Image (cartoon, coloured by chain):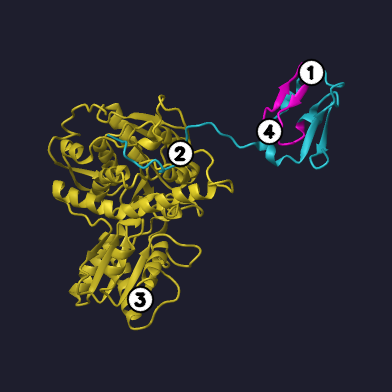
Amino acid sequence: MNQLTPNSSLMPNSSQMIVCDGNEAAARAVVLARPDVVSVFPITPQSSLVESLSQFVADGVLGAELINAEGEHSVLSALQGACLAGARTYTATSGPGLAFMFEPYVRTPGLRLPMVVSLVTRDMLSPQCVWGGQQDAMSVRECGWIQIYCEDVQEVLDTVVMAFKLAEHKDVLLPVNVCHDGNYLSYGVSRVEMPAAGLVDEFLGEAAVNWHIALDPARPMAVDPLTGGTGPGGAASFVGYRKSQVRAMANALRVFSDIHAEWGERFGRHWAPLVEEYRLDDADIAIVTIGSMTGAGKDAVDAARDRGEKVGLIKVKMYRPFPREAMVAALSKVKAAAIVDRSVSFAWECGPLHQDVMTALFASPARIPLVGCIGGLAGADITGEHFARVIAATFQAAGGDIPSSPVWLNEHD
Amino acid sequence: MTLRNVPDNMCPIATEYTTMLTGDWRALRPIVDRDRCVKCATCWLYCPVQCVVEKAAWFDFNYDFCKGCGICAEECPHRAIRMVEEAEG
């Protein structure tokens, strides 16, 4: 366990209000979580996050071993080794950095390594772009990592801390991506309440090691030997590992809900762990949002309510595993819904979230018309005006006029 | 905290040395002509799976691991190795 250098301005003994952007909030959450090893490579729009971490290490505020690797493939490979040796680990990346990380990335969940990696989401090239969008994170939605999306800077800080507890829970033991939108959250500045370091220590406890694969000179072994194939027992053993991985993902829904409840009790902030329902109980229609667009979405809901229109909002926080029961329960309250994606599914001519919601609805009696909307690509803003159009299209869908292809919100901007 | 109570079937590890026999899929078998072999060790140097074994007066192969790639026969400066169809041999 790291010894922390006391620094009253950065590591208060009681909660403290600060002003910072989302990248710094994530870095400060990492300080609170006291990882043993942090490995980094800078990439827009994540760079200032790892610069903050480097500064905290240089200042003695963060007692972690900091590895400046030569690229993201090495970043994650180094963390895998550290994790196998029993360390609590963290890194952050974006877009092309995530792409370069892919080979060790897909191996991590199967090894059941409980690490936390922030994805500062960025639209995927090409076309060449450096701005926010969720295409990078959505591209890895089926790799077995837990994925959580944040709405604002405070939620980034709180969620990064909570993610360590989720990753290390014995019924989960999986890597977690905490996603925050590039530009809008990475550089968006707001007031943030820093929880007291001592209380976070109590909340998190010491790093939990997956002892089954922890490296130990007294117990020599090879990690990840050839498994599967057509030999005796090969198929059964591979299926066994996959099945337990899928079960751990399903467990994450319950565990994350419990962690949120405990966080609320200890720190007074009650975030919805899976999906948040906003002004939904008496709503006729709903808009479904994910990430930082949710703030503008809630404003648009308020404006619609002022006009006398019964509109609610459903915010997706946990995206992988997909909280299908919570989503269906929320959607069962309305007659139609719009799904606003900040990325595309190339296969389905809609957004990935839209695809998930359709799948969840198919298995339930609550089939309602859905309007697919895609906005905010490559840094584009999703404004109250855009949401007003979304709401109008959703009321039309409730009346039977359902668009057969996506509404591209920034098509004429 | 070390989670000593995690299930032992969580992910694959190997605590005993076992290996697949790469010779299982060999189609061509290298045969050494002992009269021609001068023990220059060129085959030993080139063998990608390091299955060349040294004998008293010639070099031979560990057929458990030889995949039959034929690099040894190609590289042998004394044409002391020929590749024979497994079905024939």
Same chain, labels 4 and 2: no
- Residue type marked 2: Glu
Q: Secondary structure at mark 1?
A: loop
Q: Give the image location of residue A236, x and y in percent.
A: 50, 50
Same chain, labels 2 and 3: yes
Residue hosting label 3:
A367
| Mark 2 vs 3, N-terminal side | 2
Chain identifier, cyan in the render: B
Locate the N terminus of chain A and report the quarter of the image it occupies: top left
The hue used for chain A is yellow
Question: Is A14 or B51 nearer to us in this picture?
Answer: B51
Q: Which residues are magenta?
A: B49-71
Q: Which residue shows up at 30% across the image and 55% down it? A: A253
- Residue type marked 4: Asp
3D distance between C-alphas at marks 3 and 4: 61 Å
Residue hosting label 1:
B39
Of badges 3 and 4, nearer the viewer stands 4
Whether residue A409 is visible, yes or no, is no
- Residue type marked 1: Lys
Residue hosting label 2:
A72
Furthest residue toward left: A14
| Residue B56 part of the magenta segment | yes
3D distance between C-alphas at marks 2 and 3: 43 Å
Of badges 1 and 2, nearer the viewer stands 1
